[in-house]
Image (spheres, rainbow, N blue to C red):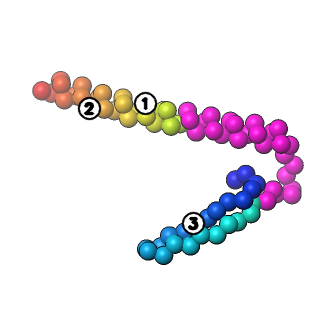
Amino acid sequence: MEPGTYTVKVTAGSDTQTQTVQVEEDPRIQVSAEDRAARHDAIMKLFELSRTATLDQRQINALKVALDAAIAG
């Protein structure tokens, strides 16, 4: 998780609690702002690739189901 201020929301049944928390850098690890930005960009690109792959997989599965139905029909 990147350092910064985050809002945490917890819901249990109809009860919801919200609180702001501050995430600080680990002082044992030295990361430049450029390296942190590059890491963030890489993670976001990988997330988008994963999302696209999942959508493609769903389309392939739907085509397989349709093809199987056409062959069986």
The image quarter containing residue 61 is top left
Residue 16: horizontal and vertical position, in percent? 52, 72
Mark 3–mark 1 Cα distance, whole angstroms, equals: 33 Å
Residue picked out by circle 2: 65
Residue 44: horizontal and vertical position, in percent? 63, 38
For marks 2 and 1, the one nearer the N-term is: 1
For marks 3 and 1, the one nearer the N-term is: 3
Say above or below: 3 vs 65: below
Badge 1: how crowded within 10 Å, few (<14), some, or many (20+)?
few
Residue 52: horizontal and vertical position, in percent? 49, 32
User: Nearer the viewer's eye, disc 2 or disc 1?
Assistant: 1
Residue most extreme to the left: 73
Q: Which residues are magenta?
A: 24-49
Residue picked out by circle 3: 9
Residue ID at (48%, 76%): 15
Badge 2: how crowded within 10 Å, few (<14), some, or many (20+)?
few
Residue ID at (82%, 57%): 26
The residue nearer to you, when weighing 52 against 13, is 13
Residue ID at (58%, 39%): 47
